[in-house]
Amino acid sequence: MGKIQIELDERELRVLSELCALGLTVLGQAMPDSRDARVDAWHKLLVELIRAGRSVPELAKDLEYNPDCGYWFFKRPYVEGAFYSDVLDEYRDAVFWEELVTRSAGQVLVEQLGAEKVEALSPEERSRCTAALEQALWNEVTNHGIDRLVFLMPESES
């Protein structure tokens, strides 16, 4: 396969570099010990694309070689104010609330029907059984966060 060249202005290269930083951050958190060749290929390409940003003085001033990870990356002060960090924070927040609502509704269903009956349900049936509760939980966490949620632990665990 031949090489392909693309032309980017400084702004576009900065955006591409931030997209690469986002990808590296997600890979590092989601698949830190992966032995999958696809992860390695993504990682290598993302690192190479960020390193290419060193050729643009305006972008290079925001990059440094990070000995902890072994490649060029954005400096900490830049990361803290970067748009990709905002995107990542919003994504983490969305995943947190989605998991909280979904798992809470699923747990209630298990408590009501029992684990065996819930496992026997198809995904569609499970979804129908939890839909109203999920909606109520979404309304609750949207309006109040976790302030009014109560988590009860068995006496043996408290």
Image (cartoon, rainbow, N blue to C red):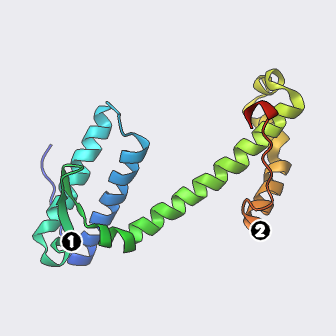
Q: Which residue is mark 1?
A: 8
Residue at x 78% of width, y 47% of height: 151
- In this rendering, the answer to whether 75 lies above or below 41 is below
Could you tell me residue 141's position as x and y percent?
A: 74, 61
* Side of 120 where 26 appears, left or right: left
- In this rendering, the answer to whether 137 lies above or below 33 is below
Specify the quadrant that holds the C terminus: top right
* Side of 102 where 76 appears, left or right: left
Tell me if label 1 and label 2 are in contact, CB under 8 Å.
Answer: no
Could you tell me residue 28's position as x and y percent?
A: 36, 46
* Side of 7 where 122 appears, left or right: right
* Pointer 1 or 2: first along the chain: 1
Could you tell me residue 127's position as x and y percent?
A: 77, 40
Q: Quadrant of residue 51?
A: bottom left
| Direction right: furthest residue | 112
- Secondary element under disc 2, as helix, strand or loop, is helix
The residues bearing labels 1 and 2 have C-alpha atoms spaced at a distance of 43 Å
Q: Nearer the viewer, residue 61 or 84?
A: 61
Residue at x 85% of width, y 33% of height: 111
Could you tell me residue 60's position as x and y percent?
A: 16, 71
- Secondary element under disc 1, as helix, strand or loop, is loop
The amino acid on which the numbered mark 2 sits, given as a three-letter code, is: Asn
Q: Which residue is mark 2?
A: 143
Residue at x 35% of width, y 34% of height: 33
The amino acid on which the numbered mark 1 sits, given as a three-letter code, is: Leu
Specify the quadrant that holds the N terminus: top left
Mark 2 nearby-residue class (10 Å; few <14, some 14–19, many ≥20) = few
Q: Quadrant of residue 144?
A: bottom right
Residue at x 12% of width, y 47% of height: 2
